[in-house]
Image (cartoon, helix red, strand yellow):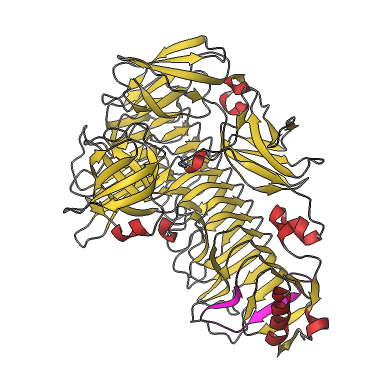
């Protein structure tokens, strides 16, 4: 019987629905079923795969909404529950809340307007102990996020969170939030804990319920009580440190610094300590210590607010240092300026902060002035929020983030490239080398501009994930798979890293599972037995290949803006699974890249980082990249191996975008052809129909303007084009692929 792993999202009537799975053989048919079980329509496939991995049908001309699907092959109809457009809540911005707190519910299909329905999303909280649910009208809605306020009058305690979009048929279902997006062994309902609101003004301004965990009532005046001078000449290290130590010893509190310039060597914040200035611009802490962190956090529950951090002028420029370092376990930075610029503007080996820990961490209302190539990172495992900040970079690798449940909201990043600048980047999700995966990120409403210096200069990126090994499957069961290490990038990471497995060829193609255990079975090359959760929908076969690594999963870039960059607005740079980029505004950048990377080299280096089920939707690209004088959408697989190692790019969907190449109509893309949407396969081996690298791409509803060529398809397999509007585009499609399907276009 057919088994489906994944279905297209936000599909309108008369648009294409892709179904990815196994046993979709022959000429499949798909039933669209109403909530009462009756058949609304039956559609035959308009594109199929000879190996049965996917098929596509047209969403029928029925009421916009969510429908249960049943799929038929020659053996009969599928029996498992399967839906299109059904609301899919995946995670919550907060685990705790208080009345009036703004909360984000993140997921997919959260707005019926995306599929031409009427917007009517509601949230409700259901008491865990029983009782009537409390309905909430959201503050804002988009397909990936519902903003709502925790209502007043709710008793403290736990609440389930449910959502309904109120569209046709199964769009009327109330769906409860659980943890399924984390691929757990056991799925359980998520619970939001309600508690009283904090009373301190700073605590309220943080907009997180864990602000209640600090002792705001205890305020220590460092000048009055400990005789700190703050005159810009005296050494205030001992005075401030005594205040911090005494606060930590008595359960924590707020160390208040009145306006002044406080010269210190190094400070250590113990558990529960908040270092709070009177005014961000007039309360300045100037450390001298380099060669480590100037301010260190130890233990848990720390905060810094309303002040400026700046090294003393005599501090060495050449010693790698960070203004803030240490533990991030309930850490907030609020209205802090990190000033790392020197006068004159010269390079320094200083970073604003490098912290690590379990989380949560909040950075809000801060300003960063950076002239360092040092990496600055949130090495924080869970729940980082970075919002309403300004980042002014004169040199540097950008804002690197490695976290599950990551929010990056309403920030501005600008480059003022200094003469000494060597590498510049913007907002990007960092590699999985931290030891865990980057799950459930939401990067929204940010602005990155003037990224036209040296280096990559990507405004946004999901940078290359961490690759462990890849190879042929020798055996499998419902919960295990034995993989031969044909490509080994970092074999020792099996014992230290959180690992996911993706089936990249053969039976079970496209499934992702978390590793729960592994055992080296020996042999040469080595064979590793992985235990996975949840169990496979379809266990891989001996014709399958599997890639193991730490991937970017379920990450959404929404409504971000980029202006002026020699590189693509955004790049999914290997190891990205089920990620979305929607409603972006890109002007004068190189466009957008989806880049799968497979390589093994004579010196022993290797990587295997595929890109699967990623989406680009409703975005606008205009202008031209300043350096390369070109712009477009590029699907690239870098296959630097003499042996076939699986599919690098699978199931990418590019829908309803506008690409206007009037500034570079006949200009070849840097890594592809002279087209608005182009594919590029960098290959050491001959690509054949039975060895695809870019597979099952769908491009639908896009508008291509002022381009010599619309699509340039280079050795793609099963590419589908539907409903494209061409304006001043002499050659719509340049097809050098296999099994391309050209459906009706405008």
Q: Is residue 296 magenta?
A: yes
Q: Quadrant of the C terminus?
A: top left
Q: Position of residue 46 (x, y in %)?
A: 37, 18
Instruction: Locate residue 617 relative to residue 150 in the image: left or right.
Output: left
Nearest the camera: 23 or 414? 23
Q: Is residue 668 visible?
A: no
In the current view of this chain or complex, which residue is farthest to the bottom?
234
Residue reaching furthest left? 524
Check the image and report above or below for 474 versus 724: below
Q: Residue 513: x and y, percent?
A: 39, 42
Query: Which residue is located at x 52 percent, y 9 percent?
Result: 38
Residue at 51% across, 72% down: 372
Q: Residue at x 53, y 22 (%)?
A: 12
Residue 697, percent from left and from top = 37, 32
Drawn side of residue 72 relative to residue 474, left or right: right
Residue at the front extreme of this rendering: 129
Which residue does the image show at 29% across and 52% down from the upper left? 519
Task: Determine whether, in the image, residue 584 is placed left or right of residue 677.
Answer: right
Find out whether residue 650 is within the magenta segment. no
The one nearer the camera, 402 or 218, is 218
Which quadrant of the figure has residue 262? bottom right
Q: Is residue 374 above or below residue 1?
A: below
State whether residue 112 appears in this view: yes
Give x and y (percent) for residue 273. Answer: 70, 70
- Magenta span covers which residues? 278-299
Among the 4 quarters of the image, the one containing residue 30: top left
């Amino acid at each position: 019987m057919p088994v489906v792993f994944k279905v297209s999202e936000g599909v309108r009537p008369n648009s294409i629905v892709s179904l990815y799975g196994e046993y979709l053989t022959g000429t499949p048919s798909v039933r669209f079923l109403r909530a009462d079980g009756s058949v609304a329509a039956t559609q035959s496939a308009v594109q199929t795969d000879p190996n049965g991995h996917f098929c596509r049908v047209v969403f029928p001309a029925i009421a916009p909404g969510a429908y249960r699907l049943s799929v038929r092959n020659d053996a009969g109809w599928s029996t498992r529950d399967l839906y299109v457009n059904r609301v899919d809540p995946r995670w919550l911005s907060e685990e705790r809340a208080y009345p009036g707190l703004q909360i984000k519910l993140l997921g997919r299909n959260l707005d019926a307007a995306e599929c031409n329905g009427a917007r009517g999303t509601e949230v409700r909280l259901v008491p865990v102990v029983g009782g009537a649910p409390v309905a909430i009208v959201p503050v804002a809605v988009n397909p990936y996020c519902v903003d709502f306020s925790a209502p007043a009058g709710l008793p403290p305690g736990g609440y389930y969170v449910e959502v309904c979009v109120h569209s046709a048929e199964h769009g009327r279902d109330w769906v409860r939030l659980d943890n399924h997006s984390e691929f757990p062994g056991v799925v359980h309902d998520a619970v939001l804990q309600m508690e009283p609101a904090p009373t301190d003004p700073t605590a309220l301004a943080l907009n997180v319920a864990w602000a209640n965990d600090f002792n705001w009532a205890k305020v220590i005046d460092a000048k009055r009580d400990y005789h700190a001078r703050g005159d810009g000449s005296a050494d205030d290290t001992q005075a401030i440190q005594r205040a911090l130590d005494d606060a930590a010893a008595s359960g924590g509190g707020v160390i208040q610094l009145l306006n002044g310039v406080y010269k210190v060597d190094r400070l250590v914040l113990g558990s529960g300590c908040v270092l709070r200035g009177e005014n961000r611009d007039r309360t300045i802490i100037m450390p001298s210590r380099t060669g480590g962190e100037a301010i260190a956090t130890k233990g848990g529950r720390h905060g810094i607010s309303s002040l400026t951090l700046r090294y003393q002028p005599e501090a060495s420029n050449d010693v790698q240092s960070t203004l803030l370092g240490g533990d991030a376990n309930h850490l907030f930075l609020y209205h802090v300026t990190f000033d790392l610029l020197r006068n004159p503007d010269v390079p320094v080996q200083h970073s604003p902060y490098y912290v690590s820990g379990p989380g949560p961490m909040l950075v809000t209302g801060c300003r960063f002035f950076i002239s360092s190539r040092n990496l600055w990172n949130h090495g924080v495992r869970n729940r980082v929020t970075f919002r309403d900040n300004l980042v002014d970079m004169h040199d540097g690798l950008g804002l690197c983030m490695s976290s599950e449940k990551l929010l990056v909201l309403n920030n501005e990043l600008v480059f003022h490239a200094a003469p000494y600048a060597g590498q510049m980047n913007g907002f990007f999700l960092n590699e999985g080398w931290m030891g865990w995966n980057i799950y459930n990120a939401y990067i929204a409403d940010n602005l990155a501009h003037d990224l036209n210096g040296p280096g990559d200069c990507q405004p946004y990126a999901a940078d290359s994930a961490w690759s462990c090994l890849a190879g042929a499957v020798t055996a499998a069961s419902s919960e295990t798979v034995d993989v031969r290490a044909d490509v080994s990038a970092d074999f020792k990471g099996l014992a230290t890293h959180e690992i996911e497995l993706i089936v990249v060829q053969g039976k079970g193609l496209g499934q992702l599972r978390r590793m729960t255990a592994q055992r080296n079975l020996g042999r040469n090359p080595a064979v590793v037995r992985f235990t996975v959760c949840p169990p496979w929908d379809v266990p891989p076969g001996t014709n399958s290949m599997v890639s193991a690594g730490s991937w970017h999963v379920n990450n959404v870039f929404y409504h971000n803006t980029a202006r002026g960059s020699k590189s693509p607005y955004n790049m999914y740079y290997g190891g990205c699974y089920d990620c979305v980029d929607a409603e972006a505004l890109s002007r004068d950048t190189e466009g957008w890249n989806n880049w799968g990377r497979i390589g093994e080299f004579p010196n022993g280096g290797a990587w295997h980082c595929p890109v699967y089920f990623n989406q680009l939707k409703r975005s606008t690209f205009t202008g031209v990249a300043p350096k390369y004088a070109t712009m477009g959408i590029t699907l690239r697989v870098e296959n630097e191996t003499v042996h076939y190692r699986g599919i690098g790019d699978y199931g990418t969907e590019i829908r309803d975008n506008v690409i206007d190449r009037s500034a570079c109509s006949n200009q070849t893309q840097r890594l592809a052809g002279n087209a608005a949407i182009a594919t590029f396969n960098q290959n050491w081996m001959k690509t054949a129909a039975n060895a695809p690298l870019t597979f099952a791409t769908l491009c639908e509803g896009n508008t291509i303007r002022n381009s010599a060529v619309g699509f340039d398809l280079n050795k793609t397999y099963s590419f589908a084009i539907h409903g494209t509007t061409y304006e001043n585009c002499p050659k719509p499609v340049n097809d050098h692929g296999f099994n391309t399907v050209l459906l009706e276009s405008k």
